[in-house]
Image (spheres, helix red, strand yellow):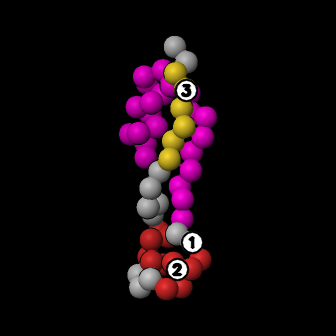
Amino acid sequence: MTAYVNGLIRQGFGITGLVEPEPGEKLLRTVAGMNDELRRPMMLIVSAVKER
């Protein structure tokens, strides 16, 4: 995550949002091993705006 965020900052972007979605409660109950997905983000969503 550091490489992505710092890369955007170095290129003149301002971070306006950051989200690490987690599996829903139903998935956690019904899909084997899904609880293990809580120890790291499944995906990362970054919102950024060019400032310079």
Q: Position of residue 3 (x, y in %)?
A: 38, 39
Label drawn at residue 28: 2
Residue 11 inside the magenta-drawn segment: yes
On screen, 22 above or below 19? below
Q: Nearer the viewer, residue 21 or 3?
A: 21
| Amino acid under disc 2 | Leu
Q: Are marks 1 and 2 in contact (CB under 8 Å)?
A: yes
Q: Position of residue 52 (x, y in %)?
A: 52, 13
On screen, 24 above or below 46? below
Q: Measure the alpha-carbon separation of dots 1 and 2.
A: 6 Å
Where, by quadrant of the figure, is residue 22 drawn?
bottom right
Residue 35 inside the magenta-drawn segment: no
On screen, 6 above or below 27? above
Secondary structure beneath dot 1 equals loop
Residue carrying label 3? 49
Q: Are marks 3 and 2 in contact (CB under 8 Å)?
A: no
Q: Earlier in the sequence, mark 3 or mark 2?
A: 2
Q: Residue at x 43, y 46 (%)?
A: 1
Residue carrying label 1? 24
Secondary structure beneath dot 2 equals helix
Q: Residue at x 44, y 56 (%)?
A: 43
Residues shaded magenta: 1-22
